[in-house]
Structures are given as C-alpha cells and as structure tokens.
C-alpha cells in the first residue's frame, strides 16, 4: 500500500513535471531563464503571452484552425466509422474477416511514409491551403483504429438486447439511435478523443498541405515560432504557445473524464 | 389450430441444429419445450419468433404462414432468459419504447404502462434502472414488456433459470395467473423437468435437435416413449437395468418395494428427503434407487422387488419403447 502511494507520486511527478516546467517558463522573462536564482521585479511576466496573442495573425487564430480541423475530422470519422463498425460486428463471413485484417494492418501502418504521396494528391486535386480538405486525410488515417475500436464495442453488446428491440418493432435506425449508440457512448467518447488528438498533434501533413500563415494549424504555427529567428530561441513565447495549445485538450479531458475511463475499462469486466 | 410447426429444420454450416420438428399448439395451451442444453429448444423458439430463418419446413400462426413476415409483425410476446432489458433506460422508458415505436399516443402509453405496473405490483420501480433492481423484479419487467406487446402468442425462453429456487416457486403462480392460464398459447422453454411438469399442459422433449416425445406430463412420466425421455423425466432418476436380449428394462424408484422373496441386495447409502427417503442398493443388476417411507426400517441386507406391470421395456437398438 505504501509502495503503491510512492509509486503513484513518482508517476505523477514524472508526467506532470514537464508541464509544470513549461508553465514556469511561459511566465518567466528571458533573464530569469538564464539566471534561475535572480530576485528582481522582472522575475515574472505576462510578456510572452501578450507577444503571442498580439502577433500577426494572432495566436488564437491557429487555435481556431486546429479546433475546426479537429472537430470536423472527428465528425467525419465517426459518421463513417459507426455504421461501418456496426455492420462489421454483425457479419462473420470471409469478406468481413479480410476487411478486419486490412484495417488492423493499416491501423499499424506508419503514416509518415504516406505524406509525400498525399502531397501529390493534394497538388493534383488542388487541396492545398484548405482547412476543410485537410480533414480528409486526417479522418482517413484515423478511420482504421476508430472502426476497430467501435466494432469491439458493438460486439460487446449482448445479442438479446438488439433482438428484444427488433421484437418491439424498432427499425435499424431507431435501434442505433435509442439502444446501441447510448450503450457504446463510452467507446464513442474515447474514440472521438483519440481522433481529435491525432489531428490536433499532426505535423507533417499540415506542414506540407498548408502554407498560408492564416490557415496554419497549431503544431506548425508553434514550430514556426521556434524557428522564427536564427539568433535566438524564444523559449518564453514558445512555452506560452504550448500552454495555450493544451488548454482545449485539458478541457475536453476534464469534461469527458468519466466516459474515457469507463471506455478504457470496458470489456474488462462483464457487467 | 393456433401454432403449427411442420417438418421444421435449421441447418447451420452443414449441421442440423434441429430437424423434423412437428408440433401443433392448441388454443390457450401452454406447451413446454424441454431438453438438455444444446438440444435445440431455444433455436425452435427463435425460429418461431422470426429471429432466425428455418432451412426447411414451415411455421404457421392461426393458419397463416409466417414465412417472410418480420418478427415485429408476428405479434409475439417474448421473454428472454437474460430478460434483455435496456440497461440505459428506466423501467418506464423500457416499457414505453415499444409502445412509442408502434405508434400509441402518449396518454395511451401511460394508461397501459400504469395498468401492467399495477398488475405486476412493481409501480414503485417506475424510475429505477434495470441494474438497480433485483433479479425477480427484472423478470417482472420483462413479463410486463411481453404483456404490453398484446401478442397472439407468448414465447418464454427459460424465464426463470436465472432466479434462485425460492423465487422461482414464488413466481410460478404469478406467471400462471398472468400469462399461462390466459386464452393465448404459451411456449415455455426450460431445461428443468419439474418446472415443465408443474407449469405446462403438454411437454415436447427435445434431444439433439430431434423431437423425442410430445404429450401431457402424465403421459411422459407413465409411458416414456424412449430411453432418453425415461431418463430425463422424473427425479430421482428411473432405474435403467443392463440390457438383456436387446431389451432394456427400467423401473421408477417409487415402484420398488421391500419383499422377502425379492432380489438380495446391500444398502449402500440413503438420502433423507424429508417426506421420504432415497435408498441406494447394490444388487446383481447394478445400483438400484428406491423411494421409501421415512418410517421404513431398512435392514442392512434387504430384499427388494417390483411389480411386473410397472416395468418399462425399451429396445436397445432404437432406444424406443416396446409395447
């Protein structure tokens, strides 16, 4: 029990310390960072945040871009993955087994290898510099994992429940709407967060598909910030950008905490 | 005739799950489908409900062939073994869902639900969710849902097998009052032969997907048509003797009595059952079970016998009854 507590504290420090350091850096002046032990009125500052928010285009624009891309890719992924996984969970023929194999394969495929050919696609179909277009590769890349997760969730629903609703007269759409989707809500929430996280963090495709500065997503904008000057690295501004960039994620996790946790443990215990 | 199963069969991946099932259900009758697990009794029920499609044969309800008719249009009130209540909905929502979908007005939904909740004495559970109520209560909700369906026929799939023995006996009269003694036919699937005998007018015994025998509980008990039925019906189990000249003789434990001219045997052990006792004897014919009065004083080496007319004779070849 005691060892357990020490371990938990250790893991907490291990994972929270970098975040704390980032927070500390974002409120420090450049002098304070190079000389950690100075005590001067210039020790703490909001300058980094002001600098970021007043740049051109302002930083919240990137946040908004990332939010649009994230929400839209998540929506597209779920709209396609839910019916696909429902039918995969129902059928057990050779074709569905083969599709699952392909899905598992592509879920494990390192997508970085794809980005050059994706760039070609973007050029050919004129998809560059378009926030809506970038959602297509994002949702396509998240699709295999999303389908596999949701298929497992659909399979966990006892067969009796759906048959009972068939006997009660519910159509396929009504069954999905009133019985099946509410029952797999935790899995949908955790899948949605995985997809959202992927598009929120994605770098190579965003870097190559988007060049207009007012359309950049967060990761690319941050990288630009870090490399904006040859002579110095603006640590403070960079840290402020990461802090702002992680606030939406923290908020999502806090709101959906219960669903995520129950989604993670789902299937572990028969209930 | 209300429900007729004609030559019904289901084949999955070249295995016949059930085959040659011919059953006619009389109006208002409760028919029990009885058999060990895997015998095809639940499969038969699913075919009637329309959840699976038969590979051969036909099912007709009130002289109307059910082929191609969707489960909901068959107007069937089904109770699942697991109850199949929707876990995310409250009791009232569970009951209302079907009514809503089938187009009842809100006032009518309310009236009907209140009526069945009163009938089953579960009105206090209205706003609970299935996981917050006991097994017996869930069972009642499942019954209520079947009642609300206002069906032509009730299909009950082992409705009480998840309940403890006490509750099962408590619920039996209620089940009889609400569903079984009504004018609608009931098909009751169970693996418990005592429950089947207690509750139904006729029993169909299934084994390995075949219909072994169909008849009243008395017929099955007194004149089992096969070795399987003789073994399956009646507790304590019937005494099956070693075959002689391809004839197998069986005698029920209660037909055996002490007799000074009987066969010599040795008492192995006895089980006290309360109203009587079950005695196990070692005899030259193998172990014999006998039901005796508790007052009976058993010598350690008694002699036992039975009346010739109480014997059941079976052919060892076909397993069927002779004479």
Image (cartoon, rainbow, N blue to C red):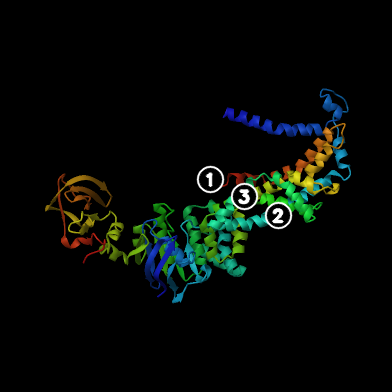
Q: Mark 1–mark 2 contact, CB under 8 Å?
A: no
Q: Report which residue position mark 2 lands on.
A: A75
> On the image, which quarter does residue B253 sit in?
bottom left
Disc sitting over residue A218 in the figure = none
The correct choice, above or below, for B157 with respect to A255 in the image is below
Q: Residue B274 appears at what percent x and percent y? A: 28, 50
Nearer mark to the viewer, of 3 and 2 = 2
Q: Residue A1 appears at what percent x and percent y? A: 56, 30
Q: CA distance from mark 1 to mark 2?
A: 29 Å
Q: Report which residue position mark 3 lands on.
A: A187
Asked whether, in this view, residue B285 is left or right of residue A248, the answer is left
Image point (60%, 53%), residue name: A184
Residue A23: tell me if it is visible: yes
- First reached walking from the N terminus: tag 3 or tag 2: 2
- First reached walking from the N terminus: tag 1 or tag 2: 2
Disc sitting over residue A269 in the figure = 1
Q: Quarter of the image containing the C terminus of chain B? A: bottom left
Give a yes or no on whether discs 3 and 1 share a subunit: yes
Give a yes or no on whether discs 1 and 2 share a subunit: yes
Label 3: how many Cα within 10 Å (few below 14, some 14–19, many 20+)? many
Q: Residue B40 appears at what percent x and percent y? A: 40, 60
Q: CA distance from mark 3 to mark 2?
A: 15 Å
> On the image, which quarter does residue B124 sit in?
bottom right
Image point (59%, 61%), residue name: A175
Residue B118: tell me if it is visible: no
């Amino acid at each position: 029990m005691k060892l357990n507590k020490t371990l938990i504290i250790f893991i907490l420090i291990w994972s929270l310390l970098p975040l704390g350091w980032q927070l500390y850096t974002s409120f420090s002046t450049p002098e304070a960072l190079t000389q950690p032990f100075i005590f001067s009125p210039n020790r703490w500052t909001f300058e980094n945040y002001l600098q970021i928010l007043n740049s051109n285009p302002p930083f919240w624009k990137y946040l908004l871009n990332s939010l649009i891309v994230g929400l839209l890719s998540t929506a597209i992924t779920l709209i396609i993955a839910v019916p696909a996984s429902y039918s995969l969970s129902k059928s057990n023929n050779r074709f569905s087994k083969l599709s699952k194999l392909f899905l598992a394969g592509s879920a494990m495929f390192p997508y970085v290898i794809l980005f050059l050919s994706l760039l070609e696609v973007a050029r050919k179909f004129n998809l560059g510099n378009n926030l809506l277009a970038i959602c297509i590769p994002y949702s396509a890349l998240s699709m295999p994992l999303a389908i596999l997760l949701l298929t497992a969730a659909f399979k966990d629903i006892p067969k009796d429940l759906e048959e009972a609703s068939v006997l009660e007269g519910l159509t396929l759409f009504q069954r999905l709407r009133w019985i099946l989707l509410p029952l797999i809500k935790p899995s949908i929430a955790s899948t949605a967060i995985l997809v959202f996280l992927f598009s929120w963090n994605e770098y190579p495709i965003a870097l190559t598909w988007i060049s207009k500065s007012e359309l950049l997503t967060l990761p690319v904008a941050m990288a630009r910030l870090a490399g904006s000057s040859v002579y110095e690295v603006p640590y403070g501004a960079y840290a402020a950008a990461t802090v702002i960039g992680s606030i939406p994620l923290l908020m999502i996790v806090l709101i959906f905490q219960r669903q995520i946790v129950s989604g993670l443990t789902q299937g572990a215990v028969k209930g | 005739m209300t429900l007729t199963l004609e030559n019904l069969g289901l084949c999955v991946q070249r295995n016949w799950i059930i085959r040659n099932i011919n059953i006619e259900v009389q109006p208002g009758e409760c028919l029990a489908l009885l058999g060990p697990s895997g015998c095809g009794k639940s499969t038969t029920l699913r075919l009637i409900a329309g959840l699976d499609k038969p590979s051969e044969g036909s099912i007709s309800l009130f002289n109307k062939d059910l082929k191609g008719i969707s489960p909901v249009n068959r107007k069937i009130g089904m109770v699942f073994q697991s109850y199949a209540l929707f876990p995310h909905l409250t009791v009232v929502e569970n009951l209302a869902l079907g009514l809503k979908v089938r187009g009842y007005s809100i006032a009518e939904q309310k009236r009907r639900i209140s009526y069945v909740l009163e009938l089953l004495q579960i009105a206090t559970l209205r706003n609970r969710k299935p996981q917050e109520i006991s097994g017996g209560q869930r069972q009642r909700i499942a019954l209520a849902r079947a009642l609300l369906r206002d069906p032509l026929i009730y299909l009950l799939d082992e409705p009480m097998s998840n309940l403890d023995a006490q509750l099962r006996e408590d619920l039996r009269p209620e089940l009889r009052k609400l569903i079984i003694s009504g004018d609608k036919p009931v098909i009751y699937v169970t693996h418990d032969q005592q429950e089947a005998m207690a509750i139904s007018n006729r029993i169909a015994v299934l084994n390995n997907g075949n219909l072994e025998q169909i008849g009243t509980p008395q017929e099955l008990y007194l004149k089992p048509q096969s070795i399987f039925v003789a073994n399956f019906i009646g507790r304590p189990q019937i005494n099956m003797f070693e075959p002689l000249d391809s004839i197998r003789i069986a005698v029920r434990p209660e037909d055996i009595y002490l007799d000074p001219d009987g066969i010599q045997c040795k008492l192995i052990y006895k089980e006290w059952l309360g109203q009587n006792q079950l005695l196990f004897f070692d005899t030259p014919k193998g172990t014999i079970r006998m039901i005796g009065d508790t007052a009976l004083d058993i010598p350690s080496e008694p002699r036992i016998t039975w009346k010739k007319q109480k014997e059941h004779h079976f052919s060892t070849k076909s397993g069927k009854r002779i004479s």
